[in-house]
């Protein structure tokens, strides 16, 4: 979203947390506006990509979204000015102000620009994925993200919130296998299906037997291995 103050970003499409289109207050429904803190997050991306000038401009965008108090709001108004409702384009809406998260992002961006690097970027992650260029050998499936396909050359990792036995097949149930989940210690129970050697177009079928309730899921799920 292009605002007079600079580029702004929404949380996601169809965000209903914010004022209504006519500027009336949020009443459980509404239309979400741009969040200045997301400009700060984008600025960190720009800095990491070597575009320091753009990162500096996004810092100024966050500053321009404030009023005389210099407090950074949660959201800014992205419509035409509505003076009767004290709503002005690119300025604080009726959302939280200040938003501590936004101020934290601003301070972090200030520090990163001073250091000319993302100061809180985990060094181990950079070493593993940038310098060593290691790639994940797993592709995840969850109940809140039921992927229907997966890349070739990866194992299918099923992540559940309760212990279960995974009943699975790679030949249309002509044969089947059972794999118990393991407790990761993070509130997630995981099991891996060895799909890394499967050719494109092969289908993995699976369902679950839940240990605590001692019942079957009652639904088969399917993930197809993609062609290269």
Image (cartoon, grey):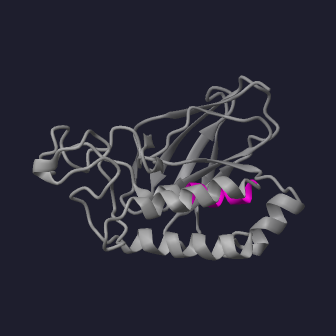
Q: Quadrant of residue 102?
A: bottom left
Relative depth, front residue between 2 and 168: 2
Tell me: 48 left or right of 100. Answer: right
Residue at 41 percent across and 49 percent down: it is: 11
Q: Judge whether 130 appears above or below 215 on screen.
A: below
- Specify start and end residues of the magenta stretch as a single range: 40-49
- Give the quarter of the figure containing the N terminus: top left
Seen in the image, is 228 located left or right of residue 61? right
Residue lying furthest right: 132
**Rendered location of residue 64, percent (x, y):** 42, 60
Describe residue 50's horizontal placement relative to residue 150 as left or right. Answer: right
How far from the left and from the top, in percent, is residue 71? Answer: 34, 72
Numbered disc total: 0
Q: Position of residue 212 (x, y in %)?
A: 39, 63
Residue found 74% across the figure and 70% down from its top: 116
Q: Is residue 124 above or below residue 2?
A: below
Where 127 sits versus 55, above or below?
below
Q: Position of residue 137 (x, y in %)?
A: 77, 51
In the displayed structure image, the side of residue 49 where residue 20 appears, left or right? left
Say if residue 141 shows up in the picture.
yes
What secondary structure is the magenta-colored segment mainly? Answer: helix
Between residues 205 and 225, which one lies in front from this camera angle?
225
Q: Residue at x 15, y 38 (%)?
A: 22
Q: Is residue 46 magenta?
A: yes
* Residue 133 among those drawn in magenta: no
Give the residue displayed 56% in from the left and 49% down from the top: 166
The quadrant in which residue 115 appears is bottom right
Quarter occupied by the C terminus: top right
Is residue 164 something one can see in this rendering? no
């Amino acid at each position: 979203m292009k605002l007079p103050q600079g580029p702004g970003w929404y949380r996601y499409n169809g965000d209903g947390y914010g004022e209504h289109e006519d500027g009336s207050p949020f009443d459980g429904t509404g239309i979400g506006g741009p969040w200045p803190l997301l400009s700060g997050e984008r600025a960190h991306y720009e800095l990491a990509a070597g575009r320091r000038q753009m990162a500096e401009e996004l810092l100024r965008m966050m500053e321009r979204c404030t009023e005389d108090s210099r407090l950074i709001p949660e959201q800014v108004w992205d419509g035409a000015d509505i003076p009767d409702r004290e709503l002005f384009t690119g300025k604080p809406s009726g959302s939280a102000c200040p938003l501590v998260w936004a101020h934290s992002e601003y301070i972090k961006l200030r520090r990163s620009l001073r250091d000319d690097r993302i100061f809180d970027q985990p060094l181990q992650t950079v070493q593993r994925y940038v310098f060593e260029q290691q790639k994940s050998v797993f592709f995840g499936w969850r109940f809140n993200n039921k992927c229907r396909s997966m890349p070739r050359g990866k194992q299918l990792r099923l992540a559940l919130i309760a212990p279960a036995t995974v009943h699975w097949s790679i030949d249309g149930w002509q044969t089947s296998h059972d794999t118990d989940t393991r407790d990761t210690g993070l509130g997630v129970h995981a099991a891996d299906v060895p799909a890394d050697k499967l050719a494109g177009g092969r289908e993995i079928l699976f369902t679950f037997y839940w240990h605590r309730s001692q019942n079957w899921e009652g639904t088969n799920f399917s993930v197809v291995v993609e062609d290269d």
